[in-house]
Image (spheres, grey):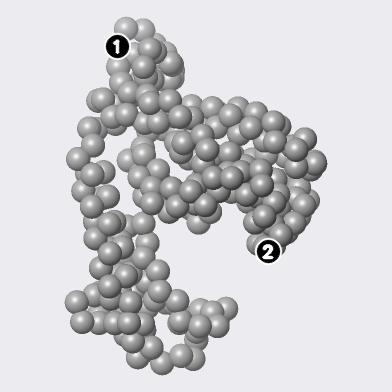
Amino acid sequence: MASDRFVYRLRRSDRARRARLTVTCEGEIVVVLPRRMPDAEADRLVRQHATWLDRHVSRISGQQELLAARPPLGEGRSLEVAGEPCRISEVDGAATRPMRGHVERVPGGLLVRLGHDGRTTPELLEGWLRSRAREVISERSAARVPELAVRPGRISIRDQSSRWASASSSGALSFSWRLLLAPPFVLDAVVVHELAHLRIRGHTPVFWALVEQHAPRTREARRWLRKHASEVRAALD
């Protein structure tokens, strides 16, 4: 659908109680309306927030241009892994002898050796990063447990599309492996956030006070994740 100079997607929701306007990481404008609300409300909302939309769509467009200008993965692109800048290089390890592809640390970066197993550079890197994320997140969670006085359950490393982490009522924790690509203070803030949920389930003022007590840079971390979400999610594209 379109309103003035903006094209947007209209979505209906039985759970929505009011109209909601968002811009996705790809720059798509989405308006969510309650099931019985008139379509005209979507146009009104888009016009009302035209300045906000201009700012966010322009920002995302600029981010997409920067992503498109990156060197190809494996040909010199850099990733920040647990706060450490790493240059990604790729070699054809299968050219010398039969072998499985793997990733290894080299001075200043990561070397991806392609093997006979058919896995691509992104697939090999993701497997290595998931494994490394499990190590780092488990270590940081264990370090924060005593001060928060909680007893977490199993930690899962996944690739959630809609959230960075979650905590279940049973104490199980789940984190996106992509948090390894964020600065350490951001990862720490997310870890504290989820551990705090083992004491307080909702996002109440008491909950936020607890989180900021143990992770004072929480607001800065949240801003970083909002600003760099598309970059982190497209890191291996």
Q: What label does residue 95 carry, if any?
A: 1
Crowd band around label 1 with a 10 angstrom C-alpha radius: few (<14), some (14–19), many (20+): few
Q: Is residue 28 above or below residue 109?
A: below
- Residue drawn at 58 percent across, 39 percent down: 188
- The residue under the point 69% across, 57% down is 207
Residue 153 visible from this viewpoint = no
Q: Which residue is mark 2?
A: 204
Which quarter of the picture shows residue 156? top right
Residue 170 percent location from the top left of the image:
78, 51
Which residue is painted at 77% across and 52% down in the image?
199
Question: In this orientation, which residue lies closer to the viewer: 14 or 195?
Answer: 195
Q: Earlier in the sequence, mark 2 or mark 1?
A: 1
Q: Is residue 92 left or right of residue 175?
A: left
Bin the neighbour count of mark 2 within 10 Å (Cα to Cα): few under 14, some 14-19, many 20 and up.
few
Q: Nearer the viewer, residue 133 or 146?
A: 146
Q: Quadrant of residue 89?
A: top left
The residue depicted at 32 percent of the width and 7 percent of the height is 96
Q: Identify which amino acid the numbered label 2 is placed on.
A: Thr
- Of helix, strand and loop, which one carries label 2? loop
Which x, y percent locates residue 236?
Answer: 36, 37
Instruction: Relative to 150, say whether 40 is above or below.
Output: below
Residue 131 higher or lower than 46, as above or below: above
